[in-house]
Amino acid sequence: MKSRKFYLFSLILLCVAFRQSSISAQTPTPLPAAIAAQNTVETRKAETDLIHQGDLIDVDVIGSVRYDWRGKINPEGFLDGVEYAENPIYALCRSEQQIAAAVAQAYGKIFRQPKIIVKILDRSNRPPAVIYGAVKTPQRFQIRRPVYLNELLVAGGGLTEKSSGEILIFRPESLSCAAPIEEKAAATADGEKNQGKFLTVGQDSGGGSSYINIKISDLLAGKKEANPQILSGDIITVVEAEPIYVTGGVVNPKQISSRAQITLSRAVASAGGLTKNASAGKVTVFRREAGETKVIETDLERIKDGEAEDLILRPFDIVEVAQTGREKTKSPPILKASEPGEKKISNLPLRVID
């Protein structure tokens, strides 16, 4: 009898232990990666909840309509036009609760323990990041999550053949409340501070506008400093190379980008080579120097035979290959100007990065 009771008691203990182990298996200890992801989501949400340039803000004074306010912050970051406040109320990159407390303090001389509710009514007019220049699809981006340069270049359709090999990023002052992830990491490191590895050119220690100069070769090589995080309001310019024009007796008269040193023979080859009626021995290069046009006569046949130097072209040179049966040009041909790379930013399509 005792053995039977002992058997039943042991069976109950086993069941309880099995149930506890099952519960433990269903609720595992959070992994560091999961915790980091949760913290990242909370950080993004916190940054989104801060007041940015372009936000429509509503200040509601409970129990009064006269003292209510609705509007946007001015370029300096203050609530523009709040009456009955002795000092301007700074709002840029502050939370709704912080602004409510500041307004309550300002109205403390008018009301006894005023209750203030501040709400961001519209976030859609926050400054977008812009990419244009030597990209296939210049456009604007409304950034709602961390995003890096390479992702926006892909979203812009990639680079065009007019790219000079450089990218300039202009970062206006106070248009984003999100600090780059790398800056945050540096700020929390063991006493180490960010030494401006991203703002390599024109860095302003006073928090003003700055710009970043990046070589595309470094970006393609995978260098971390060449792929910075892009913030709201950043203006990314993929710099277009200065042109060289090849005309006359070539298969495909065209504009060539002077990304690096390019010789006359290479320029002609890139334009499809010579046509059947081309006079290879009569090639003219028109070059602007000191406000005047310099005329350089050369011979592609002698260059091919190694009897003449292959001329290195300069930006804005006009190469004209003579054609049999046509009179030789004595002055630079009039060329149709290409479309400017810079377009009105406000007319570019807008894409949301979420």
Image: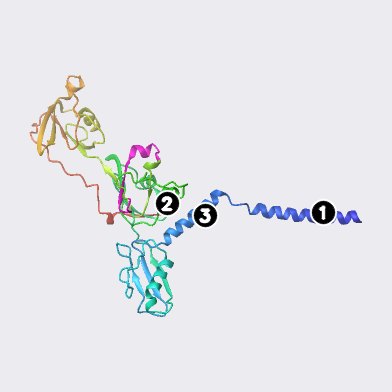
- Residue shown at 37%/48% (left/top)? 152
Q: Position of residue 333 (x, y in %)?
A: 12, 38
Q: Dot 3: what SS?
A: helix
The verdict on residue 217 being magenta is: yes
Q: Nearer the viewer, residue 66 or 151?
A: 66
Mark 2 highlights which residue? 146
In the picture, measured across the screen, residue 300 lies left or right of residue 35, that is left
Mark 3 highlights which residue? 38
Q: Name the quadrant of the C terminus.
A: bottom left
**Amino acid bearing label 1:** Ser
Q: Quadrant of residue 305?
A: top left
In the picture, measured across the screen, residue 140 lies left or right of residue 291, that is right
**Label 1 vs 3, first from the N-terminus:** 1
Q: Position of residue 142 (x, y in %)?
A: 37, 56
- Residue shown at 45%/56% (left/top)? 44
Q: Quadrant of residue 92?
A: bottom left
- Give the Cα separation between the discs numbered 2 and 1: 56 Å
The verdict on residue 162 being magenta is: no
Q: Position of residue 100 (x, y in %)?
A: 41, 70
**Label 2 vs 1, first from the N-terminus:** 1
Mark 1 highlights which residue? 10
**Amino acid bearing label 3:** Gln
**Label 3 vs 2, first from the N-terminus:** 3
Please say if the residues under marks 3 and 2 sit with CB atoms less than 8 Å apart: no
Q: Dot 2: what SS?
A: loop
Few, some or many residues within 10 Å of mark 1 (<14, 14–19, 20+) = few
- Give the Cα separation between the discs numbered 3 and 2: 14 Å
Q: Nearer the viewer, residue 281 or 58?
A: 58
